[in-house]
Image (tube, rainbow, N blue to C red):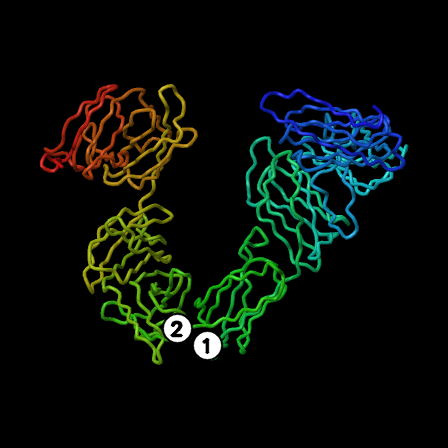
Amino acid sequence: MTGRTLFLLLALPAGVFAADVVVRIAPVPAASGCLSHATIIALDVDGGEETRVVVPDGARSATVVVKDGHPVLIRVSAPGCWSETAELTTPHEGDVILALRPVAHLQSAFEPGRVKFPASIEATAFPLPASGERAQLPASGHRLDCSYADGKWDCLGPADLPFDLRLTTPGLAPIYYWGVIARAGEVRSLEPRALHPGGSLSGWVEGPDGKPLEGARLLLAPAATASGEEGHALPREVFARTNRRGFFQLTGIADGEYRLVSRVEGFSPVLLPVVNIRDGESLTWPRAIRHLPWAALEVRLDPPVDSDGKPWTIELEERIPLAREATPPLRHAASLEGIWRAERLRADDYRAVVKDRSDAILERFDVDLSKGATTTIPLSIHRIMTRGVLRVGDAPLEAEIRFTQQSGRSVSAKTNSLGEFDAAFPRPGSWTPTIYPHGPDGARIRAKSINVPEATETPASIEITLPGGRIQGTVVDAKGSEERAAVHVMRDGRLVAQQMTDDDGKFDFIGIDEGSYAIDGEGRSGTAPGRPAHVTKGETTEVKLQLEPVHEVSAIVMTPNGAPASGAVVRVSADGGESWTLLFTDVEGRFEYSSPRRGPLQVIVMTQLYPALVAQLRQESSTPATLVLQPRGGKLRLRSRGYVGRGGTLASLNMYFLPGSPFGLYEGAAYLEPGVYTVCAEHVLDGRCRQVTINPLTEQTVDPRPTEEATP
């Protein structure tokens, strides 16, 4: 068989196609003697099957039969020699050429410490990059044959060839040796290294020219403040610096989400905003972290100053801040020539706003500085001059005004004692004014939108007229002393205005439309239930709110077998069903409710597996009440909105019913515990109500509307 190529035929399962791979051996002169006892080994990565082909004496090639489409690792086994390993993803890539070199021994040990020695190791050799190439490790290397026991290891590597060595162990951070070289027949001892538990992150840092950067400082910080579970470490900050190859390794990382920041003198910092690390995972960042030069931004404004000769101001902020805490935007005024410039900016995306001397936003723009160069932007400031007047009813109002658009632009103005103001708008269109009668920290009134026309030679006229109604009053505590509180004005269940009083408890709402309102308050000592107030055009309505102590009520919802009913829907009413508060039970089946009123609370508990539980809670109890769900019940189906009551009390069950019937009717169903119920169209007990008996495992349909209304 000398001088011939040996073909090995394999019997493959039906439906699996075979492919021939020609493996050529390229020994260095010192390894020529290994060819007399060489074997080609092909490992099927998917199936784990190994194929061996003996190379004939003197031959430098052999053919291996592999499964088509399966990734294969191919190497040469020869006594006294070391072979490269080739990874073949498809057999149609061409011949495989493997270098063969004399073997050298490498040995070392792991430093003893608190970490137990691993059960196994895996060693991989990576050829050094050629001069001028990037210093990153290739995507794949060459597996070394190793023996390992009790923290000591011995591996066979290529002789007289410098390479990088990586040792990997299950659940621990990899260990690296750089630029290792050993002579043929030599036993090279490497310094012992420590083992690091937890997750690890490694990678490469380079400059704008692609060359490695030594001494870069890497900071891995938690993306958000987190609380660790029992037995798990809390995320913490981890530091590292790059070596002369630009390589860094961060170890001992707890499970979590992190931000990675790289800094190096003379270059712009780099931020990787989201890095997910899992416990015991060794992650290598797939691309080199490239530092770019500092960026600069120059904005040329036209006109260079405003109509009063004052310079514009620009605020510049990072779209994604470098630090976890938001950093204040860079802000300063442009020159009188209309030039605004910022130096030493991080190469990234930014958002800028242009403001006038009154701090009104005239322009917004985004700018990409990610290439690390100087960017110049010409920007025209449009100004539509207006003159206006602000009135409450027929009387002028002295106040501050802030006009806003959905685009985020804003314009500020201040009226005089006659209600007159001047304002310059950057764009025509609809603007919404917000009125601050007592300054920006006081009450505010949202007025109807105004329309700003296109610019003309003369200022446009604007008139803002607020309704003439007014609500004034005082908030006092249970003893009658004034107290600082938040006051709300409601109309038909909708919030119309709100205001925080001063320490004297006084509030003053102006610009209120004629109509009926409810006024409530909330302070340190309690809450003030809604008080009715009718506002007449041009008149002032006086209201006094008295805070009542808040009463805490809690209960635990249990299933029939005594387990907590977590996630149950709970509706609570303190006013006999007039209004309801939505709550949910926690993992212990518990819910809490703060009520400003004494007296019984109406409670409805709904789950998917049990009938609805209707109950009353007393506020006098200091311990949580226990509510037990019933195992069986009947199904009540309502057509149209209705109220279901028991024991003389009605409760709205509308929230459990979903629209589902034709003709626009309101239809749905709820499970109720057995008993007699009253079903009404309104929340009053009158002749239109019907008595319904709910029996276990039965279903009834009721339309609570009067007969003439119930017919579609």
Whether label 1 touches label 2, CB < 8 Å: yes
Using a 10 Å C-alpha cutoff, classify the residue at mark 1 as few (fewer than 14 neighbours), some (14 to 19) or many (20 or more): some
Instruction: Identify the residue at horizontal 56%, vertical 52% (top origin).
Output: 325
- The residue lying toward the viewer, choosing from 408 and 578, is 408
> Which quadrant holds residue 643?
top left
Disc 2 marks which residue?
Answer: 424
- For the residues marked 1 and 2, what is the alpha-carbon distance in whole angstroms? 10 Å
- In this rendering, would 342 be left or right of 634? right
- In this rendering, would 409 be left or right of 64? left
Could you tell which of marks 1 and 2 lies nearer the N-terminus? 1
- The residue lying toward the viewer, choosing from 523 and 189, is 189
Residue 186: x %, y % from top left: 90, 33
Quarter occupied by the N terminus: top right
Residue 142 appears in view:
yes
Quarter occupied by the C terminus: top left
- The residue lying toward the viewer, choosing from 169 and 99, is 99
Does residue 2 lie above or below 280 as drawn? above
Instruction: Identify the residue at horizontal 79%, vertical 24% (top origin).
Output: 54
Q: Which mark is residue 306?
A: 1
Callout 1: SS = loop
Instruction: Check disc 2 and give the amino acid type.
Output: Ala
Residue 366: x %, y % from top left: 51, 61
- In this rendering, would 63 be left or right of 421? right
> Which quadrant holds residue 267?
bottom right
Instruction: Check disc 1 and give the amino acid type.
Output: Asp
- In this rendering, would 454 be left or right of 676? right
Residue 648: x %, y % from top left: 18, 30
Residue 149 appears in view:
no
Q: Which mark is residue 436?
A: none
Does residue 121 lie above or below 181 as drawn? above
Using a 10 Å C-alpha cutoff, classify the residue at mark 2 as few (fewer than 14 neighbours), some (14 to 19) or many (20 or more): many
Callout 2: SS = strand
